[in-house]
Image (tube, rainbow, N blue to C red):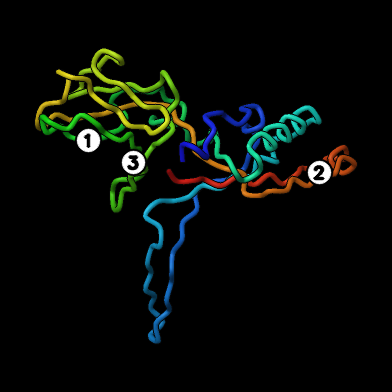
Amino acid sequence: MTLAFHEVLFPLDIALGSAGGPERKTDIVVLGSGREERNARWAHSRRRYDAGYGVKTLDALAQVVAFFEERRGRLYGFRWRDRLDHASAAPGAAVSPLDQTIGTGDGATAAFQLTKTYGGAHAPYVRPIVKPVAGSVRVAVDGVEQVEAVDFACDVTTGVVTFLAGRVPPAGAAITAGFLFDVPVRFDTDYLQIDLSAFAAGHIPHIPLVEIRP
């Protein structure tokens, strides 16, 4: 994804008014008895958004057109801030290094992927976080917060936390993290249809975005 991805954030003021959320793909077979067999085709959900709801002015529309052109339509991915789900903590809560469990030390492993867990009672879903926000990542080992650049480093393009030499967590140590993050997306169209007369009357353009995988 590196060559086809721009580490740039879609304009936040426009993203504030967006619509969208997670999508899954499930096969359902209805048996002769009327019972169902269900099978998940995707291990991970895929998010879709419509940025058009956030375009309220001609200036914002021009900003989106420039952003679209620089991304060459669907060619290059970019960062998107999901206003509902962009932090390791619960909505409204401050990020803490104890928010999410990302691994258990074995005395040798130094690299751990940032993740966020949804649910817990029945079938918790562990989502890989690959686009953390620079400077927002906090990490703890057995509840003791570590210092970035002294104890660990975080690659904000992959979401991998790497403990530095001499700082590798011991066997059995719980490794937790807190962070802000973006969603890697691309435009889901190569054509933006813009009707200025309709826009002036309150028309909202359709600007589809879809999450992409590394």
Measuring 48% from the left and 50% from the top, which residue is drawn there? 46
* Local SS, label 2: loop
User: Which badge, 3 or 1, is on the more N-terminal residue?
Assistant: 1
Q: Amino acid at mark 2?
A: Ile
| Residues packed near mark 3 inside 10 Å, few (<14), some (14 to 19) or many (20 plus) | some
Residue 77 percent location from the top left of the image: 55, 39
Residue 35 percent location from the top left of the image: 38, 78
Per the image, the residue denoted by label 1 is 103
In this view of the protein, which residue sits in the foreground, 15 or 169?
169
Residue 121 percent location from the top left of the image: 28, 49
**Label 3 to label 1: alpha-carbon separation:** 12 Å
| Residues packed near mark 2 inside 10 Å, few (<14), some (14 to 19) or many (20 plus) | some
> Of circles 2 and 3, which is in front?
2
Measuring 52% from the left and 29% from the top, which residue is drawn there? 7
Cβ–Cβ below 8 Å for labels 3 and 1?
A: no
Residue at the limit of the structure toward the front, as seen here:
3
User: Which badge, 2 or 1, is on the more N-terminal residue?
Assistant: 1
* Local SS, label 1: strand
Q: Is residue 146 above or below residue 194?
A: above
Residue 69 badge: none
> Of circles 2 and 1, which is in front?
2
Per the image, the residue denoted by label 2 is 194
Residue 117 badge: 3
Relative placement, left or right, of 16 versus 185 is right
**Label 2 to label 3: alpha-carbon separation:** 39 Å
